[in-house]
Image (spheres, rainbow, N blue to C red):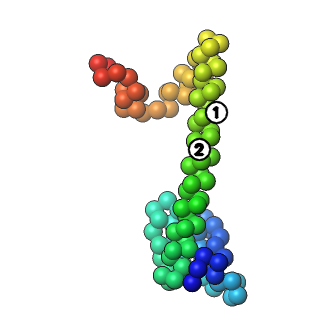
């Protein structure tokens, strides 16, 4: 069976493969976070492909947001305002802050 033979929908933290004809019949599901698959192996590839596309979209969106934040940080520094940057850095674990600095710290 190919990807087109399933109707894949997000249900909670999973993607579920439904039959196209018998609307309530499911073939399997895959957990979005753990990628654990349960069900009929005929839908495993379709669910993994769907999850891969979903993860790419999430990562692209996050990278766009990171890029915008970096641009705002640059602007804030040019204007001499580091208060928002200070607040943002307070959310990072100490290990991450130390890792950013040269080794002598």
Asked which quadrant contains residue 26, the reply is bottom right
Find the residue positioned furthest to the top: 80
Q: Position of residue 82 (x, y in %)?
A: 58, 17
Residue 94 visible in image: no
| Cβ atoms under marks 2 and 1 closer than 8 Å | no
Q: Residue at x 48, y 82 (%)?
A: 41
Q: Residue at x 60, y 21 (%)?
A: 74
Tag 2, which secondary structure? helix
Tag 1, which secondary structure? helix
Please name the residue that numbered disc 1 is placed on: 68
Find the residue positioned furthest to the bottom: 22
Q: Pick the quarter of the image with the C terminus.
A: top left
Q: Position of residue 10 (x, y in %)?
A: 63, 67
Find the residue positioned furthest to the left: 104
Task: Bin the neighbour count of mark 2 within 10 Å (Cα to Cα): few under 14, some 14-19, many 20 and up.
Answer: few
Q: Residue at x 62, y 27 (%)?
A: 71
Instruction: Specify the label residue 62 is tagged with.
Output: 2
Q: Residue at x 55, y 64 (%)?
A: 51
Instruction: Specify the label residue 54 is tagged with.
Output: none
The number of discs equals: 2
Position of residue 20 relative to residue 29, above or below, is: below
How far apart, in angstroms, are the residues tagged by discs 2 and 1? 10 Å
Q: Position of residue 42 (x, y in %)?
A: 52, 83
Residue 58 visible in image: yes
Position of residue 52 relative to residue 29, above or below, is: above
Q: Position of residue 13 (x, y in %)?
A: 57, 63
Q: Pick the quarter of the image with the N terminus.
A: bottom right
Task: Bin the neighbour count of mark 1 within 10 Å (Cα to Cα): few under 14, some 14-19, many 20 and up.
Answer: few
Name which of mark 2 and mark 1 comes first in the sequence. Answer: 2
Q: Is residue 59 left or right of residue 102?
A: right
């Amino acid at each position: 069976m190919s990807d087109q033979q399933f109707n894949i929908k997000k249900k909670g933290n999973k993607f579920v493969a439904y039959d196209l004809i018998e609307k309530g019949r499911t073939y399997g599901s895959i957990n979005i976070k753990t990628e654990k698959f349960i069900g009929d192996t005929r839908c495993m590839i379709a669910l993994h492909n769907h999850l891969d596309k979903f993860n790419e979209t999430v990562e692209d969106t996050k990278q766009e947001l990171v890029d915008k934040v970096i641009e705002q940080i640059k602007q804030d520094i040019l204007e001499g305002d580091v208060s928002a940057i200070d607040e943002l850095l307070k959310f990072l674990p100490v290990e991450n802050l130390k890792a950013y600095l040269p080794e002598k710290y």
